[in-house]
Amino acid sequence: MIKSFFFKSSPFGGIRGGLFLFLLLCLPLMVQAQKPDKNFHIFLCFGQSNMEAGARPAEQDRDFNDPRFQFLAAVNMPRTQREMGHWYTAIPPICREGNNMGPVDFFGRKMIEVIDDRYRIGVINVSVAGAKMELWDKDDYKEYIDNERDWMKAIVNQYDGNPYQRLVDMARIAQKDGVIKGILIHQGESNSDDQKWPERVKKIYNDLCADLGLNPKDVPLLAGELKHQEQGGVCWRFNVDILPNLPKTLPNSYIISAKDCESTGDQFHFSTEGMRTLGYRYAEQMLKLHKYKMKKK
């Protein structure tokens, strides 16, 4: 019937006219199909080892399989059959093979737990253990990594030597499917006495907004504290002397407290429960900043 109508009865004349009219009628549907889902909210994440994620899943974390929380693979993960640039349900690891769980995992799980089912959450995590903030500076990264340790270079090579560009490339893919609504960072152990850290973060944030066409007013940046002194954190002064200057330097940035976040036995890292608490606090802050319809209790 369709063929008969368009080819024989088209007022545009003949087969070509019929095809033209057919495509004209289909165009609104094609445009609608390509339009990003406004309820698919995407968050860019980067930092060093705590953000990279090293916490072993607790028993309560093992059965998670909710497709409303997705991650875009920033590297190939052959052991789990995940390919760079594709979306997957956010079952860890969501950074790279060899990682476990971190605040990003718990952030996403808490978000979908409390917001209405119409929303989906997506994350992209490009983190590197031990790295200074300079690694994500699009202008200075190469000079920095060229003088770093071989094990760090091996991690960075998984991002083709440029974590910032990989984050941008993955974000552009993600923008075809949803809307970038925020940036999460956890970094500072390697810049713990760097008074320029807030300015470094501001530059990277501004570069991301420019390269991705984002309005800074719509994209809050959340930065987590390092381990506190009472938890044995060796870099605790960063929380006192440097991190508080971030909101003064970068509008629309917010500090996420690490107070009472459970620790591992070392001087830098949080335990699984500490990661959970930190991730939930990222979610609580983001929920305050964006007006989500919440699930009915």
Image (cartoon, rainbow, N blue to C red):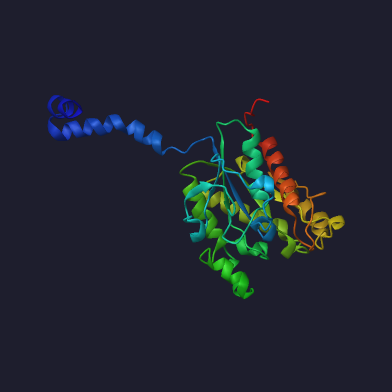
Q: Residue at x 64, y 28 (%)?
A: 295
> Image check: 99 left or right of 86?
right
Is 107 rendered above or below residue 143?
A: above
Looking at this view, is 93 or 52 the one in front?
93
Q: Residue at x 20, y 27 (%)?
A: 2
Looking at this view, is 249 or 108 the one in front?
108
> Image check: 112 left or right of 173?
right
Q: Residue at x 69, y 50 (%)?
A: 58
Position of the N terminus, as image quadrant, is: top left
Q: Quadrant of residue 25?
A: top left
Is 79 rendered above or below residue 273?
A: below
Q: Quadrant of residue 27?
A: top left
Work out whether residue 142 can be spotted: no
Q: Residue at x 15, y 27 (%)?
A: 4
The location of residue 277, given as percent across then percent down, is 74, 46
Is 185 rendered above or below residue 29?
A: below
Looking at this view, is 238 or 104 the one in front?
104
Q: How many marks?
A: 0
Position of the C terminus, as image quadrant, is: top right
Work out whether residue 152 can be spotted: yes
The location of residue 247, given as percent across then percent down, is 74, 48
> Image check: 179 left or right of 237?
left
The residue at the far right in this view is 230
Is 138 rendered above or below residue 94?
A: below
The location of residue 215, given as percent across then percent down, is 57, 43
